[in-house]
Structure formats: structure tokens, C-alpha cells
Amino acid sequence: MMVMKKFLNAIALGILLLSACIVNATPQQDKEDFQTFFTERFPEISLADFGDGVYALDQDARDQWEAMSDFPPYEEDLERGEELFNTPFANGKNYASCFENDGINIRQHYPKFNSKSGNVLTLEVAINKCRTANGESTLDYKVGDLAKISAYMSSTSEGSLINVVAPSKGNGLKAYEAGKQYFYSKRGQLNFSCANCHLQNVGRKARSETLSPALGHPTHFPVYRLKWASFGTLHRRINSCNKQVRAQPLVAQSETYKNLEYFLTYMSNGLPINGPASRK
């Protein structure tokens, strides 16, 4: 009991020191400290493997997951996403016309700060902007066709390293800082922050579930969750987290969620895209 208490105190002290260091740190310093925390906490895990979430921490769960991955439950949805991506709009154009490199192998560069609009541009927002620019209606940001299209686009980036640019000044830096603040801020009736679960208590059990590392979270979205029986975007998952801590969920692609995605993805710079993926 005493050994466990000392261990938990050491973890808490590490979190406190990390939080203190990042208050006035640059994004680059944030990323280095963030990644160092996880690699020192789990020295047996390579940086790239953090993209596997809980399956990097729990070998039994990983064995089951890898067995399931031989016949991914999302194959039909992924094929549908590719079909939708290549289907022309009513005006004859398609999604490829809206993106650099025809929309192939670009997931690793999103989200990005759009200086013209003054806010963060996620890939899901860019997909809907493409639709409206071509006279089409927008799609739901959490599920359905947009999640399938986004999943297909992610699949074309498999193995490419996340390379999100965080501005060093101006509104871009403010958006990044707002995302960081949301990650560390407590909310809801349980008074939890993202960091409480996915940094401070990473690897420990919450009921029967292992808490996954925040490092690598954005690498594998959209995710096909068995409990959803469909693809869901990162913002759908964030909403689920807020519900679990009894906080008021926000609208998908709200400014707050986009800023959080910006911060989280920058923290995972250098990790390979490995989505879409399946989760429980």
C-alpha cells in the first residue's frame, strides 16, 4: 500500500511539474514535454505505438484487437466512404477538386489554422466546405457519410507522420492556447479534465476500461467503435467523454472542440496516421 501511494504521489508530482512547465511554454516546448512525459512513463512503448491507444498498454486487449483486425468490422463503411469521395456532385465536380493532392494523403496536415477565416480548419469542416462550395448540403459532423468520407481520406494517409503547424503568434496561437486550456480544465459534475483521465491516470482502470494515453489520440480517427456499430469522428468521441464526466457536451466542430483538436493533434506531431481504426 505504501509503495502504491508513493508511486501515485510521484505521478501526481510529475503532472504538477508538467502543468507548471507548460503555462508559458511555446507549442514546441509543450510538445516536447508532453511526449517526454509519456515516453518516460512507459519506456517500453515506442513513440509510434502510442497511436494504438489502450492496445499499446494492455497486451491481452491488444491480442484480441489484432485478431479482430484481420477482418475489420468497418470494411464496408470504408468502401462506401471511397465511393462517396469519388462520386461527382450535381455540377460534375467531386471532393478531389477541393483539396491539395486531390485529397489523397493529406490527413496528417489537419487541423490547420486558417488565417483568412480566423479559426481552426479541421478536415471534417473542409469536407463540408467543399460540399457547400459545389452547391451541396452539409453533412452531419459526427456520424454517417461525412465520417465515412473522412475515414477513407485518413486511410490514404496511413503511415504518414502527423505534421500540424502551430503558429507562434496572433490568433492561431490563441486558438492553440485555448485548446490547451480546455484539455487541462476541469468540468462537469465529476470535476474532471481531459488530462485527469488521459494523462494523470493513463494506464489505470476506470471500472473495467483502461484509460488511454492522450498522446496518439488523433492518429486513428474516425474510429469504428463496436458500441456505435459505425464510424464516429473525434468530436463525437469528445462528446462521449464530456457525457461520462457529466459535463454539457458541445456542438461538434464548435470553436472549443476545434481548438482542442488543434492542440491534441499538435501534441502528436511525428506519430504516424494509423486510421481508421476499430475500438470497443
Image (tube, helix red, strand yellow):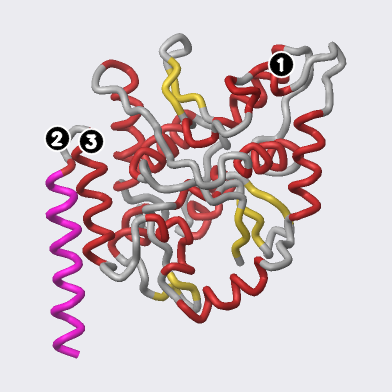
Residue 101 lies within the magenta run = no
- The quarter holding residue 100 reads top right
Picture quarter with the N terminus? bottom left
Q: Position of residue 279 (x, y in %)?
A: 60, 63
Labels 1 and 2: the sequence-earlier one:
2
Judging by the rendered image, the residue that carries numbered circle 3 is 28
User: In this view, which residue lies farthest toward the bottom?
Assistant: 1
Residue 8 lies within the magenta run = yes
Q: Nearer the viewer, residue 27 or 178?
A: 27
**Residue 151 vertical position relative to residue 225 in the rendered view, above or below:** above
Tell me: 203 left or right of 79: left
Disc 2 residue type (three-letter) = Asn
**Residue 65 vertical position relative to residue 34 in the rendered view, above or below:** below
| Callout in the foreground (3, 2) | 3
User: In this view, which residue lies farthest toward the right?
Assistant: 90
Judging by the rendered image, the residue that carries numbered circle 1 is 132
Disc 1 residue type (three-letter) = Thr
Q: Residue at x 43, y 67 (%)?
A: 56
**Residue 250 vertical position relative to residue 219 in the rendered view, above or below:** above
The reply to whether the C-beta atoms of the residues labelled 1 and 2 are less than 8 Å apart is no
Disc 3 residue type (three-letter) = Gln
Q: Nearer the viewer, residue 118 or 134?
A: 134
Which residues lie in the magenta part?
1-21
Q: Residue at x 64, y 74 (%)?
A: 67
The reply to whether the C-beta atoms of the residues labelled 3 and 2 are less than 8 Å apart is no
